[in-house]
Each structure stands twice: as structure tokens, then as C-alpha cells.
């Protein structure tokens, strides 16, 4: 149980940050502070969605799988902001 | 439908998040609910700053600045902010920090042009500072953000555990006469379901407001600008160029205020910020609120050149894109200042719910644990009972300390020793610790409740008595009546707790032989 909770709470944090980075890089508002703050908003949103989804898995492996998939998705999005 | 294993995992997460941070969630939510009315409470606690709003303003911004600036010389290398009567009804004010009180301000009556007596209480500061930083300048805000994360976990897992929250809105059952645990469980479910969306919103906005500036925005800024720290810093802070050496006569402020109101229709100007004042690159920023809109306070502003009046920048929060509007809505959604008194009253009621949820959640957990342990061994039942005792003492002392912080500055000012912001931090923490230690000496949790509610009723009566002074206006009368009603409510709760204490005192006598015989 502890391992699953750790995966849910702490594992979701890097994934959420990556989503925030990708979001901030994708936006182009006239005031740059709006892009940065929208990115930071997405971090909290992504974390509070990922955390219960990972916690609700029936095994620690599945919890890490959810976190891993989310991290991979965020990395792909982030890579696209460099490529496109 | 979630599998039972998943519900158990979510339940564990819900319990631990609530248990570890329950006490702090209680204090933050209770102070936050009161902080919705922080402006009104500040007005009520400072009779010297009350003005008659029906009197016309005879002083404009230029006359006010001329009157106040001898008290605080305006330096070109430092920003000066003049608060307009839109910020504090009927008054202009300028920050005049001194060694004893760094948040000191000097107030000027916009009608008579006279300086008012110093403020008697820093009520607004106390409520906001307690709610936003737990009275800690350094890392308090981040800590509050982390507590917001725990609350967010509790709310989201609570919704998932319940599984049918919409159906539960109308089909919740109450079990009267089934004891304290059943009552607390029903109350917990009922408040949780009815306040679900509000709690989700408050936890989300609170978390973001708490950790955005220190933990989120800096790394996001670096990611946005490929690690360029200077560009990231510029994106986060509004930097004004340093003052030029060339001095210039400055334009009058009042025409600029009127221009700002024409540039942003509906703007209620609240502050004028003066940068590089007296120099050729002086900037006058006129910031204000857009009443009855979901826009952050001071979120709309116009910047003019102080020397030639040319428009430098304009920000109307209503004309921005989707994300800036969402960001701008976070403040009003969290603090409830977007819709007048009725919305604030709604926020007060809904804002107290998480505090009750934190309390009831802890009671349910300890009662359940006590029941299980009692079945296992009498020794551990006593330990669990002590744990419930400690929880009751901490929660009750936190509430009394919060009320004491509201009343003590007014009492002290009446006695001739006004309390500044510096002693307010220990004024909250030390009574909390002292009261908690005192309450731990009491016989049982119900008696703690009785004593705490009696003290709270007394403090509410004192609050009514010390500030019921002329000039009486709508806010003073409203807060006074609310204080009386709170005193009555606490008195009624005190009676209930007293009866419960008498009953629980009798029950152990009958069962007191059980542990000794088991041992």
C-alpha cells in the first residue's frame, strides 16, 4: 500500500511538471508571464488527476505503469514543442 | 463501479491525507472562511478609520499626495503606492513604515482632508496572513500550498470513494440516536457531498496560489526559455527601468485616473503606483478592480508616462485570452470577492465546511480505531482514547486561539496598547500551545469541547462589546449581530458538550473494571 501511495503522490509530480513545461512552451500569449502561469496551472491539474488514478490501481506495478505512461506522453508533447 | 481493492486504496489515501494535515486544514479553512470578510472585519475592528460614505470627497489624488508626501518623502529609486478611496472607503493612504511597525500606513480623510488616528487593529493582515502563510513569512505560503495538495487528495479520493455523489445529494440518510460516531459519519458524508464542487475548487485554487510563485513558475519559466534565467525572471516579474538622471515636472494624477477609467470602462481605481517619480522616465500605474466580474483584484491597470502622459501599457483582464482569464479568475474564485455580500456569506458557510470535515474525519478515524483496538486489548483502547483526547485538545485550542487573535487587538487598543503586526504571530501560536496543554489536563474530549465553546462564546461577546462604538454603520451593525449570534451558537454547543461530558464521565465508571480485570 505504501509503495502504491508513494507512486501516486511522488511519481505523479515529475509527470505533472513535464506537462506544465510542454504547456508553457506550446502557448504564445503577448505577455510571456501568462504562458508560464498557465504551465504552472497545468502542473497542479495534471497532478490532481494522475494522483488518484495511480492510487486506485490494484498493484504497485500498475500504479507505476500509469505514471510511466503519463510521463511518456508528456515527454512526447515536450519533444514536439522543440521539433515543431 | 470501482473494485473493492481500489476503494480500500483510495480510502487509505483519503485517511492519511486527512489525518496528517487535518489539524492544519482545520485552521486554514476556518481562518479562510472568516477571511472572506476580512475587509469588513478590518473596518469593524478599527473605529478610527470609519468614515461616512455619504459625504462627498473633497480631496482629489493630487491634493492627497501633497498632504501625505511630507510624511513619506517620495524617492525616485523606490516605488510609492497611494491607496485611493476605492481601496478603503472614504480614505486615502500611504505606507509609512517605521522601526516598530513595518506595515504602518497613514490615512487621510477624503472628505475633511484631516489625518485620521492610527489604526487600532491589523485585522485584515492577521486573517490573510494566518490563512495564506500560517503567520510565517519565509516558507509559510509554500507549506500552505502543500496542505492544499493534501486537501485536494482528500477531496478527490472522497468523491471517488463515495462513487454516487450526485445520487447521494438527495438520498443521504441520517441516523439520529446512534451515537457520536454515526452522527459524525453522517455529517462528514453530508457536508462532503453537498460541498464537493466548492471544496474541489477551493483546494485546487489554494494549492496553485500557494505553490505557484516559489515551486511551479520558476522551473516552468526556465523550460519555456530553454534555461535562460534572465528571460524567465523577466517573464515572472514586472521590472521597471532604473530612474534616469534627468528631472522633469510631473503631470497631475487626477486627470490620469479619469483617463484610466475611460480606457478601461467600469474600472474602480484602487491604487496609484509611482515609479521613478520626478524623473523623465517616470511611470504612473493606475490599477483597480472590475466589480462583479471574475477578475483578480488590481488585475486591470493602465500605465502612463508621468512626464508626458503617453500610454505605455493597458491591461483589461476581460479582453485577454482563455488562459490569462483562467489565471485571473483563480484569486476571486478562492477568496470570493467577485459577487457582493451574498456570495461572501455563501463562501463563509461553504468555507467552514472543510474545517468541520477535517474535525469529523479525525473523530471518525479515531472512534473506528478505538473500537477495533478495544476488541483486541483494553490497554490499546485507553491509548486510542488518549489519541482522541489529544485531537480534541488541538482542534479546540486552535479555534479559540483564532478567535483570541480577532478580539485581543481591539481590547489591547482600548487599553491604550495597540498591538502591531510583529506581536501578532506569537499572539496566535502561544495561546494555541498554552490552551492545548491546558485542555489536555481536562477529563475527556466532551469537556474540552464544553470549555472551548464557553471560551469562544465569551470571546464573541467581548468582540461585540469592545467594538460596538459610534460611528455605527451597516458593516459594524452586521458584524456585531453576527458576533452575538456566534456567542449564542457557542453557548448552545457548550450546553450539548457539557451534557455529553456528564454522560461519558458516568459510562467509564461502569466499565472501568474491564481493563483491570483484563489486565
Image (cartoon, helix red, strand yellow):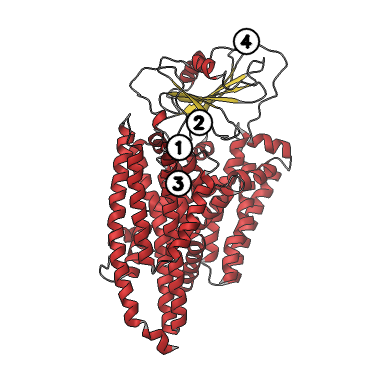
Which is more N-terminal, label 1 or label 3? Answer: 1
Horizontally, is B29 left or right of B190 in the view?
right
- Real-space Cα distance between discs 4 and 1? 38 Å
Circle 2 is placed at which residue position?
Answer: B298
Question: Are labels 2 and 4 assigned to the same chain?
Answer: yes
Label 2 marks which chain's residue? B
Q: CA distance from mark 3 to mark 1?
A: 10 Å
User: Which label sits on residue B121?
Assistant: 1
The residue carrying mark 4 is: B249
Is tag 3's residue or tag 4's residue first in the polypeptide sequence?
4
Q: Mark 4 or mark 1, which has the lower sequence index?
A: 1
The earlier-in-sequence mark between 2 and 3 is 2
Residue B176, quarter of picture:
bottom left
Query: Which percent across, then down, holds residue B407?
Result: 41, 44
Q: Residues within 10 Å of mark 2 (few under 14, many from 20)?
A: some
Residue A84 showing in the rendered view: no
Q: CA distance from mark 2 to mark 4?
A: 27 Å
Answer yes or no: are tags 4 and 1 on the same subunit: yes
Tell which of B184 and B31 is nearer to you: B31
Query: Which residue matches tag 3?
Result: B405
* Dots 2 and 3 on the same chain: yes
Which residue is located at x 46 percent, y 66 percent? B390
- When asked about the image quadrant of residue B438, the answer is bottom left
Position of residue B151 in the picture relative to residue B282 (left or right) = left
Amino acid at each position: 500500500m505504501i509503495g502504491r501511495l508513494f507512486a501516486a503522490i511522488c511519481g505523479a509530480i515529475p509527470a505533472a511538471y513535464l506537462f506544465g513545461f510542454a504547456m508553457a512552451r506550446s502557448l504564445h500569449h503577448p505577455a510571456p508571464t501568462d504562458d508560464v502561469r498557465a504551465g504552472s496551472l497545468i502542473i497542479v491539474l495534471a497532478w490532481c488527476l494522475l494522483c488518484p488514478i495511480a492510487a486506485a490501481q490494484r498493484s504497485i506495478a500498475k500504479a507505476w505503469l500509469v505514471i510511466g505512461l503519463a510521463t511518456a506522453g508528456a515527454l512526447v508533447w515536450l519533444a514536439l514543442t522543440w521539433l515543431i | 463501479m470501482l473494485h473493492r481493492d481500489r476503494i480500500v486504496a483510495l480510502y487509505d489515501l483519503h485517511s492519511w491525507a486527512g489525518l496528517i494535515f487535518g489539524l492544519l486544514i482545520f485552521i486554514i479553512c476556518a481562518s479562510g472562511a472568516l477571511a472572506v470578510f476580512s475587509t469588513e472585519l478590518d473596518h469593524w475592528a478599527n473605529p478610527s478609520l470609519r468614515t461616512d460614505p455619504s459625504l462627498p470627497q473633497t480631496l482629489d489624488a493630487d491634493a492627497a499626495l501633497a498632504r501625505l508626501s511630507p510624511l513619506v518623502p517620495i524617492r525616485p529609486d523606490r516605488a510609492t503606492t497611494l491607496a485611493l478611496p476605492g481601496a478603503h472607503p472614504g480614505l486615502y493612504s500611504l505606507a509609512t513604515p517605521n522601526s516598530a511597525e513595518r506595515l504602518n500606513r497613514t490615512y487621510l480623510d477624503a472628505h475633511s482632508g484631516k489625518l485620521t488616528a492610527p489604526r487600532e487593529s491589523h485585522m485584515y493582515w492577521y486573517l490573510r496572513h494566518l490563512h495564506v502563510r500560517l503567520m510565517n513569512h519565509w516558507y509559510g505560503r509554500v507549506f500552505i500550498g502543500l496542505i492544499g495538495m493534501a486537501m485536494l487528495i482528500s477531496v478527490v479520493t472522497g468523491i471517488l470513494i463515495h462513487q454516487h455523489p450526485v445520487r447521494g445529494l438527495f438520498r443521504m440518510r441520517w441516523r439520529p440516536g446512534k451515537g457520536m460516531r454515526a452522527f459524525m459519519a453522517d455529517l462528514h458524508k453530508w457536508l462532503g457531498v453537498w460541498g464537493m464542487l466548492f471544496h474541489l475548487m477551493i483546494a485546487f485554487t489554494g494549492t496553485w496560489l500557494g505553490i505557484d510563485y516559489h515551486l511551479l513558475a520558476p522551473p516552468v519559466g526556465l523550460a519555456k526559455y530553454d534555461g535562460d534565467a534572465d528571460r524567465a525572471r523577466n517573464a515572472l516579474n514586472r521590472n521597471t527601468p532604473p530612474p534616469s538622471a534627468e528631472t522633469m515636472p510631473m503631470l497631475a494624477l487626477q486627470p490620469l485616473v479619469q483617463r484610466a477609467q475611460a480606457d478601461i470602462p467600469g474600472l474602480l481605481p484602487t491604487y496609484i503606483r509611482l515609479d521613478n517619480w520626478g524623473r523623465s522616465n517616470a511611470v504612473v500605474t493606475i490599477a483597480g478592480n472590475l466589480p462583479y466580474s471574475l477578475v483578480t483584484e488590481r488585475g486591470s491597470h493602465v500605465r502612463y508616462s508621468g512626464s508626458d502622459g503617453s500610454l505605455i501599457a493597458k491591461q483589461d483582464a476581460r479582453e485577454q485570452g482563455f488562459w490569462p482569464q483562467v489565471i485571473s479568475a483563480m484569486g476571486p474564485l478562492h477568496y470570493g470577492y467577485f459577487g457582493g455580500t451574498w456570495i461572501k456569506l455563501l463562501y463563509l458557510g461553504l468555507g467552514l465546511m472543510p474545517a468541520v470535515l477535517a474535525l469529523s474525519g479525525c473523530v471518525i478515524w479515531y472512534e473506528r480505531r478505538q473500537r477495533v483496538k478495544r476488541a483486541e486489548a483494553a490497554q490499546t483502547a485507553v491509548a486510542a482514547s488518549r489519541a482522541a483526547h489529544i485531537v480534541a485538545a488541538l482542534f479546540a485550542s486552535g479555534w479559540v486561539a483564532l478567535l483570541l487573535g480577532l478580539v485581543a487587538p481591539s481590547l489591547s487598543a482600548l487599553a491604550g496598547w495597540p498591538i502591531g503586526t510583529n506581536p501578532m504571530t506569537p499572539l496566535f501560536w502561544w495561546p494555541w500551545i498554552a490552551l492545548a496543554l491546558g485542555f489536555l489536563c481536562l477529563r475527556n474530549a466532551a469537556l474540552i469541547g464544553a470549555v472551548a465553546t464557553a471560551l469562544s462564546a465569551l470571546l464573541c461577546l467581548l468582540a461585540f462589546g469592545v467594538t460596538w462604538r459610534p460611528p455605527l454603520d451597516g458593516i459594524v451593525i452586521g458584524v456585531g449581530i453576527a458576533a452575538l449570534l456566534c456567542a449564542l451558537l457557542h453557548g448552545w454547543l457548550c450546553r450539548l458538550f457539557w451534557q455529553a461530558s456528564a454522560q461519558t464521565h458516568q459510562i467509564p465508571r461502569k466499565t472501568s473494571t474491564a481493563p483491570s480485570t483484563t489486565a
